[in-house]
Amino acid sequence: MEHYMLFLFFLAALTQTETWAGCHTMKYFDTIVTGPSLGLEERWFMTVGYVDDQQFVRFHNSSGSQITEPRAPWIELETPDYWERETRHLKDSQHCPMSLQNLHFNYNQSDDGGVHTLQRMYGCEVFPNGSFSTFFLRYGYDGQDKLSLDPETVIWIASDQVALNLKLKLETDRSLAERWEVYLKETCVQELLRHLEKGKKTLLRTDPPSVRVTRHITSDREVFLKCRAWGFYPSEISIIWLKDGEEQIQDTEYIETRPGGDGTFQKWAAVEMPFRNEEKYTCLIQHEGLPAPLSLKWEPQSTSNGLFMGIIAAVLLLFTAVVAGVVIWKKSTLGGKGRNYALTSEIDSAQGSDVSLTARG
């Protein structure tokens, strides 16, 4: 469990590749962990694959089966040949050009006894028409980017001196970069298009967001308006606050888009303002599932209270009308019929009802 939580933390550190609305991506995230209980030869390894925002495969070396696991219903339709090829591919992912042993030594961590993690994220992106857009290949160590392959120049880019030494070694032999270029521009794109076709009912759907604006007053009478969107897919969404039509970048606080737990996503943006300035602010939401951008303002609580009280008044009025109708019906039915009147009066008297009193009058 500890290793899995570490994996989630480092995965978040690597998922910063942005995509334009309408584009589609396939990404793999590899994680290798070493620590006091794991030798370099018995390292913990896990890799997961995503199409857009949906995990579709997973492999980790601590599982007894040592095979790739399907993580989405649509991928289970793949052929046995695909699963054999995918398992071989993901097993090979354990062999990285960045050696953990060398990294421990170069970062003076050989004897520190701590947990260290090597990550790799790679994949490709296609335009809505299926043509190649770009690719990405990045290595990280202990949660920090160290080495990446530039998609334009296909040249390694280093972030520090240790990574620079690795870059120089890799550049003595161009074959690794060239193999990655072929895989990411061709094989990756073909696989991505195949997955989009098989999983199109899930992957190509658009669920518009549900939205709401709420107001929050702090103890010092500062006011926050929070614009929340939930239940949307895909995950790309824009939520901005406008004051008198101008975007409020500096005063807006965001949370990153998060999974909603049901295959959709959620996000909110909050803006701070002086008291009684709420009417100047508008929340603007844009999403692929919306036919047009959506504008929302905060509505004072009194409006909703008035609506609520109006509903209660209408219900009470309806109830009163029903009761009055029953009374009139009984009077018209029982008038002049002594036998029935007496029987009804006895029953009403036993119940102590207002109807019996009315009849006696």
Image (cartoon, rainbow, N blue to C red):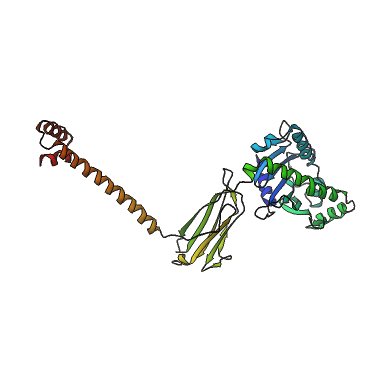
Where is residue 143 shown, x and y percent of the image? 71, 51
The answer to whether residue 82 is visible is yes
Query: Is 332 left or right of 118, judged from the image as shown?
Result: left
Where is residue 139 shown, x and y percent of the image? 76, 50
Location of residue 36 (image quadrant): top right
* Residue at position x 18%, y 35% in the image: 351
Q: How many marks?
A: 0
Query: Is 214 left or right of 340, judged from the image as shown?
Result: right
**Would you place residue 189 above or below residue 250 in this image?**
above
Query: Is 125 left or right of 203, judged from the image as shown?
Result: right
**268, 53: nearer the viewer:** 53
**68, 187: nearer the viewer:** 187
**Would you place residue 91 above or below residue 165 in this image?**
above
**Would you place residue 245 above or below residue 187 in this image?**
below
* Residue at position x 79%, y 47% in the image: 186
Where is residue 310 shown, x and y percent of the image? 33, 53
**243, 324: nearer the viewer:** 324
The answer to whether residue 114 is visible is no
Query: Is 206 left or right of 3, judged from the image as shown?
Result: left
Q: Quadrant of the C terminus?
A: top left
* Residue at position x 77%, y 54% in the image: 146
Where is residue 188 shown, x and y percent of the image? 76, 46
Q: Quadrant of the N terminus?
A: top right
